[in-house]
Image (cartoon, helix red, strand yellow):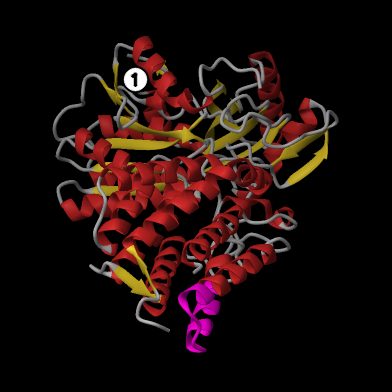
Amino acid sequence: MKKLINDPDRVLADALRGIEAAHADLRVDHENRIIYRAIPKDHGTVALVSGGGSGHEPLHGGFVGFGMLDAACAGEVFTSPTPDQMQEATKTVDRGAGVLHIVKNYTGDVMNFEMAAELAAMEASVEVRTVVVNDDVAVQDSLYTAGRRGVGLTVLLEKIVGAGAEQGRSLDEVVALAEKVNADGRSMGMALTSCTVPAAGKPTFDLPEDQMEIGIGIHGEPGRHRVQMGTASEIAQQLVEPILGDLDFGSSPTIVMLNGMGGTPLIELYLMYGDVAAILEKHGVTIARSLVGNYITSLDMAGCSVTVLRADDEIVSLWDAPVETSGLRWGR
Amino acid sequence: MSTTDTITIEGFTAWLAAFRDRVTEHRSYLTELDSAIGDADHGANMARGMAAVMEKVGASPATTADELFKTVGMTLVTSVGGASGPLYGTLFLRLGMTAGAVAECDAAALSSALRAGLDGVVARGKAEAGDKTMFDAMAPALDAMDAAIASGASLAEATAAARDAAAAGRDATEPLVARKGRASYLGERSAGHLDPGATSTALLFDALAEVTAS
Protein backbone atom coordinates (compact mmCIF):
# COMPACT_ATOMS: atom_id res chain seq x y z
CA MET A 1 0.00 0.00 0.00
CA LYS A 2 1.40 3.36 -1.08
CA LYS A 3 -0.75 6.17 0.28
CA LEU A 4 -0.41 9.70 1.63
CA ILE A 5 -1.25 8.78 5.22
CA ASN A 6 0.33 9.00 8.65
CA ASP A 7 -1.39 6.05 10.28
CA PRO A 8 -4.02 3.74 8.74
CA ASP A 9 -6.18 4.07 11.87
CA ARG A 10 -6.10 7.89 11.86
CA VAL A 11 -6.95 8.63 8.24
CA LEU A 12 -10.36 10.14 8.98
CA ALA A 13 -9.24 12.27 11.94
CA ASP A 14 -6.29 13.62 9.96
CA ALA A 15 -8.43 14.32 6.87
CA LEU A 16 -10.99 16.24 8.96
CA ARG A 17 -8.16 18.43 10.24
CA GLY A 18 -7.20 19.15 6.65
CA ILE A 19 -10.77 19.98 5.63
CA GLU A 20 -10.99 22.47 8.47
CA ALA A 21 -7.65 24.02 7.55
CA ALA A 22 -8.60 24.33 3.87
CA HIS A 23 -12.10 25.78 4.19
CA ALA A 24 -12.79 28.81 6.33
CA ASP A 25 -16.53 28.54 5.53
CA LEU A 26 -16.74 25.15 7.23
CA ARG A 27 -16.60 24.23 10.90
CA VAL A 28 -15.51 20.77 12.01
CA ASP A 29 -16.58 19.04 15.22
CA HIS A 30 -13.66 16.66 15.58
CA GLU A 31 -15.06 14.73 18.51
CA ASN A 32 -18.33 13.90 16.75
CA ARG A 33 -16.83 13.97 13.25
CA ILE A 34 -19.34 16.40 11.85
CA ILE A 35 -18.76 19.03 9.17
CA TYR A 36 -21.00 22.11 9.54
CA ARG A 37 -21.47 25.39 7.71
CA ALA A 38 -19.51 28.08 9.56
CA ILE A 39 -22.53 30.39 9.14
CA PRO A 40 -25.80 28.56 9.92
CA LYS A 41 -28.79 29.15 7.65
CA ASP A 42 -31.72 31.39 8.62
CA HIS A 43 -34.14 30.49 11.36
CA GLY A 44 -37.34 28.91 10.04
CA THR A 45 -35.72 27.06 7.14
CA VAL A 46 -35.48 23.29 6.79
CA ALA A 47 -32.01 21.86 7.43
CA LEU A 48 -30.40 18.97 5.56
CA VAL A 49 -28.18 16.39 7.22
CA SER A 50 -26.42 13.64 5.33
CA GLY A 51 -23.53 11.38 6.05
CA GLY A 52 -22.02 8.04 5.39
CA GLY A 53 -18.76 6.22 5.30
CA SER A 54 -15.68 8.22 4.31
CA GLY A 55 -13.72 7.54 1.15
CA HIS A 56 -16.35 9.04 -1.19
CA GLU A 57 -15.03 12.60 -1.11
CA PRO A 58 -16.16 15.19 -1.98
CA LEU A 59 -19.41 13.46 -0.83
CA HIS A 60 -20.69 14.42 1.78
CA GLY A 61 -18.50 17.01 3.51
CA GLY A 62 -17.69 18.70 0.22
CA PHE A 63 -21.38 19.44 -0.24
CA VAL A 64 -21.86 21.29 3.03
CA GLY A 65 -22.52 24.98 2.48
CA PHE A 66 -24.96 27.47 1.04
CA GLY A 67 -27.42 25.79 -1.32
CA MET A 68 -26.73 22.22 -0.24
CA LEU A 69 -26.21 20.48 3.12
CA ASP A 70 -26.16 21.98 6.61
CA ALA A 71 -24.13 19.15 8.12
CA ALA A 72 -22.39 15.96 7.08
CA CYS A 73 -21.54 13.12 9.48
CA ALA A 74 -18.38 11.27 8.56
CA GLY A 75 -17.98 7.58 9.34
CA GLU A 76 -14.81 5.55 9.15
CA VAL A 77 -13.74 4.64 5.61
CA PHE A 78 -16.68 2.82 3.97
CA THR A 79 -18.42 2.49 7.35
CA SER A 80 -21.61 4.30 8.25
CA PRO A 81 -21.42 6.97 10.95
CA THR A 82 -23.13 6.26 14.27
CA PRO A 83 -26.53 7.39 15.62
CA ASP A 84 -25.05 9.69 18.26
CA GLN A 85 -23.19 11.64 15.56
CA MET A 86 -26.33 12.00 13.48
CA GLN A 87 -28.39 13.05 16.46
CA GLU A 88 -25.84 15.68 17.47
CA ALA A 89 -25.76 17.06 13.91
CA THR A 90 -29.55 17.09 13.76
CA LYS A 91 -29.94 19.03 17.02
CA THR A 92 -27.24 21.51 16.03
CA VAL A 93 -28.55 22.42 12.56
CA ASP A 94 -32.27 22.51 13.37
CA ARG A 95 -33.65 25.98 12.73
CA GLY A 96 -37.11 25.17 14.01
CA ALA A 97 -38.50 24.00 10.67
CA GLY A 98 -37.41 20.36 10.83
CA VAL A 99 -34.51 18.35 9.49
CA LEU A 100 -34.27 16.07 6.48
CA HIS A 101 -31.89 13.10 6.70
CA ILE A 102 -30.51 12.09 3.30
CA VAL A 103 -29.48 8.44 3.49
CA LYS A 104 -27.92 6.25 0.84
CA ASN A 105 -29.54 2.84 0.76
CA TYR A 106 -26.90 0.68 2.41
CA THR A 107 -27.85 -1.58 5.29
CA GLY A 108 -25.51 0.07 7.80
CA ASP A 109 -26.43 3.63 6.87
CA VAL A 110 -30.14 2.89 7.02
CA MET A 111 -29.91 1.15 10.42
CA ASN A 112 -27.79 3.88 12.00
CA PHE A 113 -29.96 6.72 10.68
CA GLU A 114 -33.04 4.77 11.85
CA MET A 115 -31.59 4.55 15.38
CA ALA A 116 -30.75 8.28 15.21
CA ALA A 117 -34.33 9.15 14.23
CA GLU A 118 -35.60 6.96 17.11
CA LEU A 119 -33.31 8.83 19.54
CA ALA A 120 -34.45 12.20 18.14
CA ALA A 121 -38.11 11.16 18.46
CA MET A 122 -37.51 10.16 22.10
CA GLU A 123 -36.23 13.64 22.81
CA ALA A 124 -39.22 14.96 20.82
CA SER A 125 -37.46 18.22 20.10
CA VAL A 126 -36.74 18.04 16.38
CA GLU A 127 -38.97 16.84 13.58
CA VAL A 128 -36.89 14.48 11.45
CA ARG A 129 -37.87 13.08 8.07
CA THR A 130 -35.80 10.74 5.96
CA VAL A 131 -35.27 10.12 2.28
CA VAL A 132 -33.44 6.93 1.32
CA VAL A 133 -31.73 7.28 -2.06
CA ASN A 134 -31.79 4.09 -4.15
CA ASP A 135 -30.86 4.77 -7.74
CA ASP A 136 -28.50 1.95 -8.67
CA VAL A 137 -29.97 -0.10 -11.52
CA ALA A 138 -27.24 -2.74 -11.15
CA VAL A 139 -29.11 -4.18 -8.18
CA GLN A 140 -32.39 -5.93 -8.66
CA ASP A 141 -34.84 -4.51 -6.19
CA SER A 142 -36.40 -7.63 -4.80
CA LEU A 143 -37.11 -9.47 -1.58
CA TYR A 144 -33.78 -11.17 -2.05
CA THR A 145 -31.53 -8.14 -1.81
CA ALA A 146 -31.16 -5.22 0.55
CA GLY A 147 -32.68 -3.14 -2.26
CA ARG A 148 -31.03 -0.83 -4.73
CA ARG A 149 -27.99 1.04 -3.52
CA GLY A 150 -27.83 4.79 -3.18
CA VAL A 151 -25.07 6.06 -5.44
CA GLY A 152 -24.55 8.95 -7.89
CA LEU A 153 -28.03 10.40 -7.68
CA THR A 154 -27.23 11.40 -4.08
CA VAL A 155 -25.06 14.24 -5.43
CA LEU A 156 -27.81 15.65 -7.66
CA LEU A 157 -30.41 15.20 -4.92
CA GLU A 158 -28.36 17.07 -2.34
CA LYS A 159 -27.90 19.97 -4.80
CA ILE A 160 -31.53 20.20 -5.90
CA VAL A 161 -33.18 19.61 -2.53
CA GLY A 162 -30.63 21.92 -0.89
CA ALA A 163 -31.74 24.68 -3.26
CA GLY A 164 -35.37 23.99 -2.41
CA ALA A 165 -34.69 24.21 1.33
CA GLU A 166 -32.74 27.45 0.82
CA GLN A 167 -35.85 28.97 -0.82
CA GLY A 168 -37.75 28.43 2.43
CA ARG A 169 -39.86 25.45 1.42
CA SER A 170 -41.61 23.56 4.24
CA LEU A 171 -40.41 20.17 5.49
CA ASP A 172 -43.27 18.44 3.66
CA GLU A 173 -42.36 20.20 0.43
CA VAL A 174 -38.69 19.42 0.86
CA VAL A 175 -39.49 15.73 1.47
CA ALA A 176 -41.75 15.64 -1.61
CA LEU A 177 -39.01 17.22 -3.73
CA ALA A 178 -36.45 14.68 -2.47
CA GLU A 179 -38.80 11.80 -3.24
CA LYS A 180 -39.44 13.17 -6.72
CA VAL A 181 -35.71 13.39 -7.48
CA ASN A 182 -35.16 9.90 -6.12
CA ALA A 183 -37.97 8.48 -8.25
CA ASP A 184 -36.76 10.21 -11.41
CA GLY A 185 -33.06 9.34 -11.43
CA ARG A 186 -31.01 6.21 -12.13
CA SER A 187 -27.32 5.31 -12.01
CA MET A 188 -24.94 2.58 -13.13
CA GLY A 189 -21.23 2.24 -12.37
CA MET A 190 -18.18 0.25 -13.40
CA ALA A 191 -14.66 -0.37 -12.12
CA LEU A 192 -11.36 -0.82 -13.93
CA THR A 193 -9.53 -1.56 -10.67
CA SER A 194 -10.35 -2.28 -7.07
CA CYS A 195 -9.58 0.22 -4.34
CA THR A 196 -7.42 -0.11 -1.24
CA VAL A 197 -9.01 0.58 2.14
CA PRO A 198 -6.19 2.02 4.31
CA ALA A 199 -7.05 -0.19 7.29
CA ALA A 200 -7.04 -3.30 5.08
CA GLY A 201 -3.77 -2.35 3.36
CA LYS A 202 -4.41 -4.19 0.12
CA PRO A 203 -6.92 -4.04 -2.73
CA THR A 204 -10.42 -5.25 -1.85
CA PHE A 205 -10.52 -7.51 -4.90
CA ASP A 206 -8.24 -8.55 -7.75
CA LEU A 207 -9.17 -7.51 -11.24
CA PRO A 208 -7.02 -8.88 -14.07
CA GLU A 209 -5.64 -6.44 -16.65
CA ASP A 210 -8.10 -7.52 -19.36
CA GLN A 211 -11.25 -7.48 -17.24
CA MET A 212 -13.64 -4.99 -15.64
CA GLU A 213 -16.48 -5.05 -13.12
CA ILE A 214 -19.87 -3.82 -14.27
CA GLY A 215 -22.51 -2.78 -11.76
CA ILE A 216 -20.33 -1.77 -8.84
CA GLY A 217 -21.39 0.26 -5.84
CA ILE A 218 -19.20 2.83 -4.14
CA HIS A 219 -17.45 0.72 -1.50
CA GLY A 220 -15.07 -1.36 -3.55
CA GLU A 221 -17.53 -4.20 -3.39
CA PRO A 222 -17.38 -6.36 -6.50
CA GLY A 223 -20.08 -5.73 -9.08
CA ARG A 224 -22.66 -8.06 -10.52
CA HIS A 225 -20.67 -9.10 -13.58
CA ARG A 226 -17.03 -9.39 -14.44
CA VAL A 227 -16.56 -9.03 -18.16
CA GLN A 228 -13.90 -8.58 -20.79
CA MET A 229 -12.48 -5.07 -20.97
CA GLY A 230 -13.96 -2.97 -23.80
CA THR A 231 -13.53 0.41 -25.46
CA ALA A 232 -14.95 3.55 -23.87
CA SER A 233 -17.92 3.57 -26.21
CA GLU A 234 -18.65 -0.11 -25.50
CA ILE A 235 -18.49 0.61 -21.77
CA ALA A 236 -20.72 3.67 -22.17
CA GLN A 237 -23.23 1.42 -23.89
CA GLN A 238 -23.13 -1.06 -20.99
CA LEU A 239 -23.79 1.73 -18.49
CA VAL A 240 -26.45 3.70 -20.36
CA GLU A 241 -28.60 0.85 -21.62
CA PRO A 242 -29.58 -0.58 -18.22
CA ILE A 243 -30.52 2.96 -17.13
CA LEU A 244 -32.74 3.56 -20.16
CA GLY A 245 -34.15 0.06 -19.83
CA ASP A 246 -35.18 0.78 -16.27
CA LEU A 247 -36.77 4.21 -16.59
CA ASP A 248 -38.50 5.77 -19.58
CA PHE A 249 -37.15 9.29 -19.89
CA GLY A 250 -39.50 10.03 -22.79
CA SER A 251 -38.96 13.49 -24.22
CA SER A 252 -38.17 15.02 -20.83
CA PRO A 253 -34.95 17.00 -20.53
CA THR A 254 -32.36 15.44 -18.22
CA ILE A 255 -29.41 16.24 -16.03
CA VAL A 256 -26.55 13.82 -16.68
CA MET A 257 -23.58 13.22 -14.40
CA LEU A 258 -20.47 11.36 -15.50
CA ASN A 259 -18.75 10.64 -12.21
CA GLY A 260 -15.23 9.40 -11.66
CA MET A 261 -14.57 6.76 -8.98
CA GLY A 262 -11.43 8.56 -7.79
CA GLY A 263 -8.59 6.97 -9.76
CA THR A 264 -9.50 7.89 -13.34
CA PRO A 265 -8.12 11.06 -14.94
CA LEU A 266 -10.48 13.80 -16.07
CA ILE A 267 -9.46 13.39 -19.70
CA GLU A 268 -10.92 9.87 -19.64
CA LEU A 269 -14.04 11.07 -17.85
CA TYR A 270 -14.65 13.69 -20.55
CA LEU A 271 -13.99 11.07 -23.23
CA MET A 272 -16.58 8.83 -21.56
CA TYR A 273 -19.05 11.70 -21.25
CA GLY A 274 -18.80 12.29 -24.99
CA ASP A 275 -19.72 8.67 -25.65
CA VAL A 276 -22.50 8.66 -23.05
CA ALA A 277 -24.01 11.86 -24.49
CA ALA A 278 -23.90 10.43 -28.01
CA ILE A 279 -25.70 7.26 -26.93
CA LEU A 280 -28.33 9.24 -25.04
CA GLU A 281 -28.86 11.47 -28.07
CA LYS A 282 -29.28 8.41 -30.28
CA HIS A 283 -32.06 7.28 -27.93
CA GLY A 284 -33.74 10.68 -28.14
CA VAL A 285 -32.83 11.78 -24.61
CA THR A 286 -32.23 15.53 -24.30
CA ILE A 287 -29.52 16.71 -21.93
CA ALA A 288 -30.36 20.04 -20.27
CA ARG A 289 -27.41 20.15 -17.85
CA SER A 290 -24.33 18.03 -17.24
CA LEU A 291 -21.71 17.46 -14.60
CA VAL A 292 -18.38 15.70 -15.22
CA GLY A 293 -15.82 14.97 -12.51
CA ASN A 294 -15.12 13.13 -9.25
CA TYR A 295 -18.12 13.72 -6.99
CA ILE A 296 -18.90 10.39 -5.31
CA THR A 297 -15.78 8.26 -5.27
CA SER A 298 -14.43 4.96 -3.97
CA LEU A 299 -11.00 5.98 -2.71
CA ASP A 300 -8.49 5.19 -5.47
CA MET A 301 -10.73 3.01 -7.61
CA ALA A 302 -10.47 3.58 -11.35
CA GLY A 303 -13.76 3.63 -13.19
CA CYS A 304 -16.85 5.74 -13.52
CA SER A 305 -20.60 5.91 -13.09
CA VAL A 306 -23.39 7.49 -15.09
CA THR A 307 -26.44 9.14 -13.52
CA VAL A 308 -29.42 10.35 -15.52
CA LEU A 309 -32.15 12.44 -13.87
CA ARG A 310 -35.40 13.53 -15.47
CA ALA A 311 -35.44 17.31 -15.08
CA ASP A 312 -38.44 19.54 -15.70
CA ASP A 313 -38.17 23.35 -15.54
CA GLU A 314 -38.45 23.36 -11.76
CA ILE A 315 -35.63 20.84 -11.33
CA VAL A 316 -33.41 22.67 -13.83
CA SER A 317 -33.95 26.00 -12.08
CA LEU A 318 -33.14 24.42 -8.69
CA TRP A 319 -30.01 22.93 -10.28
CA ASP A 320 -29.02 26.37 -11.57
CA ALA A 321 -29.65 28.05 -8.22
CA PRO A 322 -26.57 29.42 -6.47
CA VAL A 323 -24.42 26.96 -4.55
CA GLU A 324 -21.33 27.57 -2.47
CA THR A 325 -19.65 24.40 -1.28
CA SER A 326 -16.14 23.05 -1.72
CA GLY A 327 -17.45 20.40 -4.12
CA LEU A 328 -19.89 22.46 -6.21
CA ARG A 329 -19.81 26.23 -6.55
CA TRP A 330 -21.62 28.47 -9.01
CA GLY A 331 -23.98 31.37 -9.57
CA ARG A 332 -23.78 33.35 -6.38
CA MET B 1 -27.48 -28.43 37.88
CA SER B 2 -26.13 -27.00 41.09
CA THR B 3 -27.08 -23.55 42.30
CA THR B 4 -23.50 -22.40 41.81
CA ASP B 5 -23.72 -23.26 38.11
CA THR B 6 -24.02 -19.62 37.03
CA ILE B 7 -22.18 -16.91 35.18
CA THR B 8 -21.42 -13.86 37.29
CA ILE B 9 -20.65 -10.25 36.36
CA GLU B 10 -16.97 -11.19 36.48
CA GLY B 11 -17.78 -14.09 34.14
CA PHE B 12 -19.66 -11.79 31.75
CA THR B 13 -16.73 -9.39 31.78
CA ALA B 14 -14.33 -12.26 31.08
CA TRP B 15 -16.63 -13.30 28.19
CA LEU B 16 -16.45 -9.81 26.68
CA ALA B 17 -12.66 -9.74 27.10
CA ALA B 18 -12.36 -13.15 25.46
CA PHE B 19 -14.55 -11.94 22.58
CA ARG B 20 -12.38 -8.83 22.26
CA ASP B 21 -9.27 -11.03 22.13
CA ARG B 22 -10.79 -13.22 19.43
CA VAL B 23 -11.95 -10.40 17.13
CA THR B 24 -8.56 -8.73 17.60
CA GLU B 25 -6.69 -11.93 16.84
CA HIS B 26 -8.90 -12.68 13.83
CA ARG B 27 -9.16 -9.08 12.69
CA SER B 28 -7.42 -9.73 9.36
CA TYR B 29 -9.34 -12.94 8.76
CA LEU B 30 -12.72 -11.25 9.34
CA THR B 31 -11.72 -8.41 7.04
CA GLU B 32 -10.59 -10.92 4.42
CA LEU B 33 -13.98 -12.66 4.54
CA ASP B 34 -15.65 -9.26 4.26
CA SER B 35 -13.46 -8.33 1.28
CA ALA B 36 -14.84 -11.28 -0.64
CA ILE B 37 -18.52 -10.37 -0.28
CA GLY B 38 -18.69 -7.04 1.52
CA ASP B 39 -16.61 -3.96 2.03
CA ALA B 40 -13.52 -5.10 3.93
CA ASP B 41 -14.21 -3.47 7.27
CA HIS B 42 -15.69 -6.11 9.59
CA GLY B 43 -12.44 -7.05 11.33
CA ALA B 44 -11.35 -3.46 11.90
CA ASN B 45 -14.81 -2.44 13.11
CA MET B 46 -15.28 -5.28 15.58
CA ALA B 47 -11.75 -4.92 16.94
CA ARG B 48 -12.24 -1.17 17.39
CA GLY B 49 -15.67 -1.64 18.95
CA MET B 50 -14.66 -4.32 21.45
CA ALA B 51 -11.54 -2.38 22.43
CA ALA B 52 -13.80 0.59 23.19
CA VAL B 53 -16.16 -1.69 25.14
CA MET B 54 -13.40 -3.07 27.38
CA GLU B 55 -12.09 0.44 28.00
CA LYS B 56 -15.56 1.62 29.11
CA VAL B 57 -16.25 -1.48 31.18
CA GLY B 58 -12.85 -1.20 32.83
CA ALA B 59 -13.35 2.48 33.64
CA SER B 60 -16.73 2.02 35.34
CA PRO B 61 -17.26 -1.61 36.41
CA ALA B 62 -20.92 -2.61 36.55
CA THR B 63 -22.53 -4.58 39.36
CA THR B 64 -25.57 -5.87 37.47
CA ALA B 65 -26.07 -7.50 34.09
CA ASP B 66 -28.44 -4.83 32.74
CA GLU B 67 -25.99 -2.07 33.63
CA LEU B 68 -23.04 -3.93 32.12
CA PHE B 69 -24.71 -4.82 28.85
CA LYS B 70 -26.25 -1.38 28.42
CA THR B 71 -22.72 0.02 28.48
CA VAL B 72 -21.60 -2.68 26.04
CA GLY B 73 -24.50 -2.09 23.65
CA MET B 74 -24.31 1.70 23.65
CA THR B 75 -20.55 1.63 23.20
CA LEU B 76 -20.86 -0.65 20.18
CA VAL B 77 -23.67 1.45 18.71
CA THR B 78 -21.64 4.64 19.10
CA SER B 79 -18.20 3.34 18.13
CA VAL B 80 -18.62 0.74 15.40
CA GLY B 81 -20.91 2.16 12.72
CA GLY B 82 -21.76 0.11 9.67
CA ALA B 83 -24.34 -2.62 10.11
CA SER B 84 -22.34 -4.41 12.82
CA GLY B 85 -22.70 -1.51 15.27
CA PRO B 86 -26.51 -1.43 15.39
CA LEU B 87 -26.77 -5.22 15.17
CA TYR B 88 -24.26 -6.19 17.88
CA GLY B 89 -25.29 -3.12 19.89
CA THR B 90 -28.94 -4.14 19.82
CA LEU B 91 -27.99 -7.73 20.70
CA PHE B 92 -26.26 -6.65 23.93
CA LEU B 93 -28.84 -3.97 24.83
CA ARG B 94 -31.70 -6.51 24.63
CA LEU B 95 -29.65 -9.19 26.34
CA GLY B 96 -29.08 -6.85 29.28
CA MET B 97 -32.69 -5.70 29.47
CA THR B 98 -33.87 -9.31 29.67
CA ALA B 99 -31.19 -10.48 32.09
CA GLY B 100 -32.22 -7.59 34.35
CA ALA B 101 -30.65 -6.12 37.48
CA VAL B 102 -29.00 -9.36 38.56
CA ALA B 103 -25.43 -10.21 39.51
CA GLU B 104 -25.48 -13.68 37.97
CA CYS B 105 -27.42 -15.85 35.51
CA ASP B 106 -27.98 -19.58 35.35
CA ALA B 107 -27.99 -21.38 32.00
CA ALA B 108 -31.73 -20.90 31.42
CA ALA B 109 -31.64 -17.18 32.27
CA LEU B 110 -28.59 -16.69 30.08
CA SER B 111 -30.21 -18.52 27.21
CA SER B 112 -33.40 -16.47 27.38
CA ALA B 113 -31.39 -13.25 27.58
CA LEU B 114 -29.41 -14.31 24.51
CA ARG B 115 -32.69 -15.20 22.80
CA ALA B 116 -33.95 -11.65 23.46
CA GLY B 117 -30.71 -10.38 21.94
CA LEU B 118 -31.35 -12.46 18.83
CA ASP B 119 -34.92 -11.12 18.62
CA GLY B 120 -33.44 -7.62 18.72
CA VAL B 121 -31.06 -8.46 15.89
CA VAL B 122 -33.98 -9.77 13.85
CA ALA B 123 -36.06 -6.65 14.57
CA ARG B 124 -33.19 -4.39 13.51
CA GLY B 125 -31.88 -6.34 10.52
CA LYS B 126 -35.00 -8.23 9.42
CA ALA B 127 -32.94 -11.30 8.63
CA GLU B 128 -34.37 -14.79 8.38
CA ALA B 129 -32.78 -18.23 8.46
CA GLY B 130 -30.63 -18.82 5.39
CA ASP B 131 -30.14 -15.14 4.50
CA LYS B 132 -26.38 -15.61 5.12
CA THR B 133 -26.11 -13.38 8.19
CA MET B 134 -25.13 -13.59 11.86
CA PHE B 135 -28.61 -15.05 12.44
CA ASP B 136 -27.45 -18.30 10.82
CA ALA B 137 -24.84 -18.82 13.56
CA MET B 138 -26.78 -17.42 16.50
CA ALA B 139 -30.17 -19.08 16.01
CA PRO B 140 -28.81 -22.66 15.86
CA ALA B 141 -26.52 -21.87 18.81
CA LEU B 142 -29.47 -20.90 20.98
CA ASP B 143 -31.55 -23.85 19.82
CA ALA B 144 -28.71 -26.18 20.78
CA MET B 145 -28.26 -24.41 24.10
CA ASP B 146 -31.96 -24.75 24.93
CA ALA B 147 -31.99 -28.41 23.92
CA ALA B 148 -28.99 -29.07 26.15
CA ILE B 149 -30.59 -27.25 29.09
CA ALA B 150 -33.83 -29.19 28.60
CA SER B 151 -31.91 -32.45 28.86
CA GLY B 152 -30.28 -31.37 32.12
CA ALA B 153 -26.93 -30.13 30.88
CA SER B 154 -24.71 -27.91 33.01
CA LEU B 155 -23.95 -24.32 32.01
CA ALA B 156 -20.58 -25.45 30.63
CA GLU B 157 -22.21 -28.23 28.60
CA ALA B 158 -24.94 -25.92 27.30
CA THR B 159 -22.49 -23.23 26.16
CA ALA B 160 -20.27 -25.90 24.57
CA ALA B 161 -23.29 -27.12 22.60
CA ALA B 162 -24.04 -23.53 21.59
CA ARG B 163 -20.43 -23.02 20.49
CA ASP B 164 -20.48 -26.15 18.32
CA ALA B 165 -23.83 -25.25 16.74
CA ALA B 166 -22.68 -21.68 16.07
CA ALA B 167 -19.57 -23.02 14.31
CA ALA B 168 -21.68 -25.42 12.26
CA GLY B 169 -24.11 -22.61 11.43
CA ARG B 170 -21.19 -20.41 10.37
CA ASP B 171 -19.85 -23.16 8.10
CA ALA B 172 -23.30 -23.67 6.62
CA THR B 173 -23.35 -20.06 5.39
CA GLU B 174 -20.63 -20.82 2.83
CA PRO B 175 -22.82 -22.12 -0.02
CA LEU B 176 -25.65 -19.66 0.65
CA VAL B 177 -26.59 -16.74 -1.59
CA ALA B 178 -26.80 -13.63 0.58
CA ARG B 179 -30.19 -11.97 0.84
CA LYS B 180 -29.40 -9.23 3.34
CA GLY B 181 -26.76 -6.57 3.69
CA ARG B 182 -24.10 -5.56 1.26
CA ALA B 183 -23.33 -9.13 0.20
CA SER B 184 -26.82 -9.40 -1.29
CA TYR B 185 -25.74 -7.05 -4.10
CA LEU B 186 -23.50 -9.81 -5.41
CA GLY B 187 -26.35 -12.21 -6.06
CA GLU B 188 -25.06 -15.67 -6.92
CA ARG B 189 -21.48 -14.48 -6.55
CA SER B 190 -21.91 -14.32 -2.78
CA ALA B 191 -22.07 -18.13 -2.65
CA GLY B 192 -18.85 -19.97 -1.81
CA HIS B 193 -17.79 -17.62 0.99
CA LEU B 194 -18.33 -17.73 4.75
CA ASP B 195 -20.45 -14.88 6.07
CA PRO B 196 -18.26 -12.49 8.12
CA GLY B 197 -21.08 -11.71 10.59
CA ALA B 198 -21.81 -15.39 11.21
CA THR B 199 -18.08 -15.87 11.70
CA SER B 200 -17.76 -13.17 14.35
CA THR B 201 -20.90 -14.52 16.05
CA ALA B 202 -19.30 -17.97 16.22
CA LEU B 203 -16.35 -16.28 17.97
CA LEU B 204 -18.80 -14.78 20.49
CA PHE B 205 -20.08 -18.26 21.40
CA ASP B 206 -16.58 -19.70 21.37
CA ALA B 207 -15.61 -17.06 23.93
CA LEU B 208 -18.68 -17.83 26.05
CA ALA B 209 -17.92 -21.55 26.07
CA GLU B 210 -14.36 -20.87 27.12
CA VAL B 211 -15.20 -18.68 30.10
CA THR B 212 -17.98 -20.95 31.33
CA ALA B 213 -15.98 -24.18 30.97
CA SER B 214 -15.51 -25.55 34.46
Q: 10 Å neighbourhood of mark 1: few (<14), some, or many (≥20)?
A: some
Q: Which of these two is toward me, A326 or B137?
A: B137
Label 1 sits on a secondary structure element that is loop
Vertical placement of B157 versus A51: above or below? below
Q: Is residue B127 magenta?
A: no
Quadrant of the rendered image containing residue B67? bottom left
The span picked out in magenta is B139-158
Residue B162 position, x and y percent, is 55, 72
Compared to residue B98, the image places residue A199 above or below, namely: above
Amino acid at dot 1 = Pro
Front residue of this view, candidates A315 and B115: B115
Q: Is residue B6 visible?
A: yes
The residue that mark 1 highlights is: A322
Residue A249 seen anywhere in this rendered image of the structure: no
- Where, quadrant-wise, is the C terminus of chain A in this rendering? top left
In front here: B200 or B123? B200
- Residue at x 48% of width, y 83% of height: B149
**Nearest the camera: A59 or B11?**
B11
Figure check: B125 above or below A47 = below
Q: Quarter of the image holding residue A166?
A: top left
Is residue B153 one of those drawn in magenta? yes
The N terminus of chain A - image quarter: top right
